[in-house]
Amino acid sequence: MAIFWPDADIVYKQYLQRSCCSVPGNCKTLFDRPVVILAAPRSGSTLLFETLAEAPQIWTVGGESHHFIEGLKPLNPKYGQVDSNRLDGSHANEQIVQTLRRRFAQSLQDRDGRSYSPGQSSERLRFLEKTPKNALRQPFLDKIFPGAFYIHLVRDPRPNISSMMEAWKSGRWITYPRLPGWQGPPWSLLLPPGWQGMRKCSLAQICAFQWHTANRVILDDLERLPPERWIACQYDDLTQHTETLIQKICDFTDLQMDERLAQRTAGDLPLSRFTQTVPDAEKWRKNEAGIMPVLDSLDETWQRCGQVLKRFRLQE
């Protein structure tokens, strides 16, 4: 079975059971410069999300938005109208845009888990969104949330690919169990364009393909945006220089660092809810034999990530 954020799953099902929506019909003005995390799977995006979700102005849907988006058949690969998780502006017609805004608005909650209701607070809310498949959806999301900020989180491919391999082997992150023509293990995590060409590949090659495609597409998409709308950061800074990085992100996205968020970032961050095993810098070596042969194929994208990270590196 695929693993999704349980609370977001429940919220979405509750939404479907409601006969009417309690938020205004056009929710475009409700979302004020949303903050969207873009990252390859298993790169620490849950940890970043859970940390930023402690900012006082932030509203979320309680977790990831798999069913919010793929609950619409034209956006779900299993129905055949798209064959991957890649979505661009052409997939965001007016009906889809309005439907998704209403779905997100209906399920908003603050950092204490309190649901949003119109009139209870500012009618312009700061929304935080994180779903790994969004790595392939930035142009689509920009139609839903014009003016959004984007955070590209990058992780060294060696531990990142190893973590993805472990996710595949666990069976807990199956996303598409019956892909047409797929003979390998049930597909897990991100479904990039061109997945059909991976039929005879090793698990390390499949995960390297996912890492490469996610980061390449993120870079291609973000580099078309004005520089004031996106920032890049690395996983190591999130775990080793947490307070400095989160302050930098808050400054960039115009979020407040209040005492509660400052306390969370002052020491070691708690493990994210999707952590499989205790973090260890050498843990990736469990899969070293499979990973080392694929690293050369990632070199160009890894170098591009490095150049972008230099532009946004933390001050010494």
Image (spheres, rainbow, N blue to C red):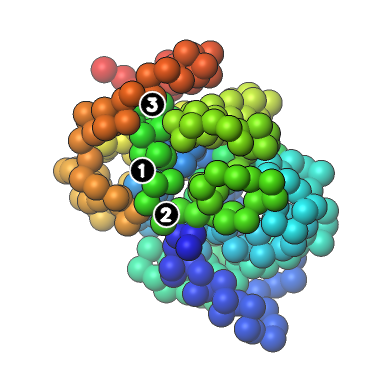
Q: How many marks?
A: 3
- Amino acid type at image mark 2: Gly
- Vertically, is 206 above or below 27? above
Q: Is residue 234 visible?
A: no
Mark 1 Cα within 10 Å, few/some/many (few <14, many 20+)? Answer: some
Using the image as rendered, state which of residue 298 and residue 18 is in the foreground.
298
Labels 1 and 2 touching (C-beta < 8 A) = no
Residue shown at the point (67%, 37%) measured from the top left:
196
Left or right: residue 245 versus residue 189 is left
Q: Where residue 212 sits: x, y (%)?
A: 53, 27
Real-space CA distance between mark 1 and mark 2, rounded to the nearest whole angstrom:
9 Å
Determine if residue 19 is in view. yes
Reading the image, the residue beneath label 2 is 171
Question: What is the C-alpha distance between the residues marked 3 and 1?
Answer: 12 Å
Disc 2 packing (10 Å; few <14; some 14–19; many ≥20)? some
Q: Which residue is found at the position 65% from the left and 51% from the top? A: 179
Helix, strand, or loop for circle 2? loop
Image coords of residue 287 (percent x, y): 32, 31
Q: Position of residue 146 (x, y in %)?
A: 68, 46
Disc 3 crowd rating (10 Å Cα; few below 14, some 14-19, many 20+) is: some
Q: Quadrant of the C terminus?
A: top left
What is the quadrant of residue 233 in the picture? top left
Q: Nearer the viewer, mark 3 or mark 1?
A: 3
Q: Which residue corresponds to mark 3?
A: 290
Q: Secondary structure at mark 1?
A: helix
User: Of marks 3 and 2, which one's residue comes earlier in the chain?
Assistant: 2
Q: Can you identify the residue that label 1 sits on?
A: 166
At numbered mark 3, what does the secondary structure look like: helix, strand or loop? helix
Please state the horizontal and vertical placement of residue 232, each as a whole percent of the image: 47, 29
Q: Which mark is residue 309?
A: none
